[in-house]
Image (cartoon, coloured by chain):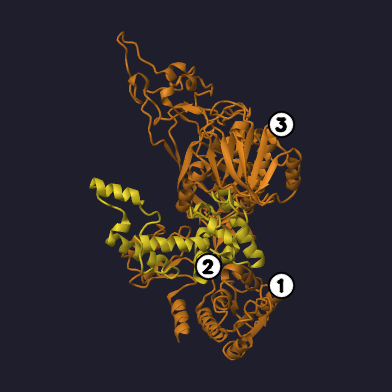
Amino acid sequence: MKIGLYICHCGRNIADVVDIKNLIGYFKDKVNVVRDHLFMCSEPAWEMIRSDVTNKLVDRVVIAACSPYNHEKFFRSALETAGLSKYLLEIANIREQCSWVHGKNKREATEKAKRLIEAAISKVKTLKPLDDLRFEVERSVLVIGGGIAGMTASLDLAKMGFKVYLVEKEPSVGGKLIKFDKIFPLNDCASCVVSSLMAEVANNPMIELITYAEVEEVDGSFGNFNVKVRKKQTYVDWEKCIGCGACTTVCPPKAWKPNEFDEGLSKRAAMYIVSPQAVPKKAVHDPELCVNCGKKKLGTRRFLRGGKEYLTPCEKACPTKAIDRSKSWNPEGELLNFNVGAIIVATGYKVMEKETFKEYAPHSPNVITALQFERILSPTGPTGGKVLRLSDGKKPKAISFISCVGSRDVRYHTYCSKVCCLYMLKQARLVKEREPEIDVYIHVIDVRAPGKDLEEYYIEARRMGIGVIRGKVGGIEELPNGRLRILGFDADLGMPVEVEVDLVVLATAIELPEDSKELARKIGVAVDPSGFLKEDHPKLRPVESTLSGIFLAGCCQGPKDVSETVAQAKAAAASVASLLSKEEIKVEPFIAKVNEEACSGCGICENVCPFNAIKVNEVAVVDERSCKGCGICASCPAKAIDIQGYSAESIIAEIDALVG
Amino acid sequence: MSLNSCIQCGTCIASCPSGRITALNTRRIIAEFISSGKKVEERDEIWFCVTCYACQERCPRGIEITDTLIEARRTLVRNKGLPGRLGYAFTFLMNHAALVPAREEHVELRRKLGLPIYHAQFDEKAKEEVRRIVEKHAGSVVRWSSSPAA
């Protein structure tokens, strides 16, 4: 056994704290080869390791450098290309666990580095050559979320020949974007951007569109996930429904509630179609809202005195008999079960409600969120796109926009929501284009318009006479005449300003909805401190989640505009394709291994396995696909189970070296 | 949270009911602290703060603005004593157990009508209590007068 030790300086990251010369002197006689390098992750250093292996100078490699999380795969490739099992490698982390945390104690840091390296050497001596596990790949993908991100990714994958299951929580795809009127920087119509995608995902033969459904369970791992999706009960026969909307107009006002599609600015009935552009355009029945006209409850029949059957207004209105309330509908809906090779999470965002911000007079109907104002500007919205305030239907004389409501604020979210500056400018411009006599003010901390075409977009807004006032608003007072007094500040003048307006638009922060966090918990994807889903690496693996085989796209990963969302969705689709286009996938072999001779078949392992990956049939058998290598089963009383690469022998050797 | 984390957004001064009509400008106080190191206690206008805490509640950086102003006032008082009339007011309070003493003719009238005299300045227990309170909070800057006037 010939051991090679390779010590990295990491520029000055390690070498400034850990005495590398000392380490070389100490290990010179304990291993066969000791070398150091300024950057062990560079190509020349990689070649140095590879040639040592090729020239048979070493057959076990210990690298003292940064966390294996960074470059373990890279170092393994040096062994593999030299013809050695790539798992005969061990990394001692002398950066994160040494120089970075013990910067003030150089001597102790060097001593700790010695211990860590000794442990790695002891462990590497016990390692056995291992091969990757190879699994067949399920060539299909689950995309969660039917917004612009989910639809773009689905279409890209479908075009590459992959079967896609697109699951959307709402009865229609389209996401938030279909609610918008126009989008920056070109002020092109949002509907034109997104409507065609909605039609395409509905009609592409490779895409199975499952709307009004939620992912309930995900099992298995990369290459072969088993997915359970709950299709919610619509109480309308979608095979027969033609989306005419007749049922929605006869539903009585007692069964109305604020319309989610109009962000609560209009009402919808218990029988509803999400939007005029809904895809699929099908009616849905909301049993919580239904008043059971004529006391006819779901699943019952009623006969009038003459023996004629009573039909509710919706049943009567339906020209295709898609609504039959006497049927025994299952309130649980339907559970779908299928396998996919990879998952893209594209669940999107929500904006904070105005009620959180007491200083901004949230009780006033004339204080609205920017998403509500999008609906006012939209031709499909409650005012048909006319700039009116909803409290009295009058045209406002002045409008104020308030930025950073809940963003850049330690009380709520410390991050910048990124898109608010631009959409406020966009909304202000749309107001000015339609009604030039309305005074428009935007109160901002800074105007953030980085990147192509965006600064120009801002300048054009200034040119149009939109008042951009630098300084955040402290509060809003409601005046007796119904107007709103903005208590602002003008940083350029250095003094407080007060503006009286008729309508206030709050640019409330973008955040991850609670149900997306719930989903993340369910499938095991990490949420980062900002509250969004965590990418595996912000620069190198920006569309990969922390779990292999699960990818992220769009605002569930962080605030971004439409261009960035589409770019990320396409990147996620391409990353999925690059993995699923192979016949088989290779997986690290660090899973449980049963010594059949020692196994007594007692079944303890089967009971303790959290992944149902081990079954006892006379002796224990491990399902290689499901095993995550957690090691709980290795507590076997007969010591019949070991985790490959982390055997009891290896771990004891490591501990002995650490404490010895 | 340090004053240095201020992003000069202006929320504090936009929320300030006093700043609207007085020289108090919390944003400028912080700006000049950051840019030239001018100490908060070197500014007279901090006495215009009505300690309503609106700025501190709304500061998106979580800066304890009102607390900083109050602390600066304490430092000022410790170093220089209370500003003119305020020192007089506290001394008066200490000696008379009231900022507004009872009017002589009212007291006479109450005596004549046999009504109880409830003013703190005639109640030794109350006077003692007020003296203790003033001493506790401003004892270092006001002095107990040995000849309490009735």
Q: Label 3 amino acid?
A: Pro
Q: Which chain is painted in orange?
A: A
- Do circles 1 and 3 both sit on a common chain? yes
Element under label 1?
helix
Please tell me the numbered disc located at residue A301: none
Please tell me the numbered disc located at residue B76: 2
In the rendered image, which residue does mark 3 sit on? Answer: A436
- Along the line of sight, the residue nearer the viewer: A327 or B81: B81
Spatial separation of the CA atoms under disc 2 and disc 1: 64 Å
Could one spot residue A419 in this view of the protein?
no
Q: Position of residue B74 (x, y in %)?
A: 49, 66
Q: Mark 2 or 1, which is nearer the eye?
A: 2
Q: Mark 1 or 3, which is nearer the eye?
A: 3
Q: Label 1 amino acid?
A: Glu
Q: Label 2 amino acid?
A: Leu
Q: Residue at x 43, y 21 (%)?
A: A252
In the rendered image, which residue does mark 1 sit on? Answer: A43
Crowding near the residue tagged with mark 2, few <14, some 14–19, many ≥20 C-alpha atoms within 10 Å: some
Q: Which chain is painted in yellow?
A: B
Q: Which image quadrant: the C terminus of chain A? A: bottom left
Element under label 3?
loop
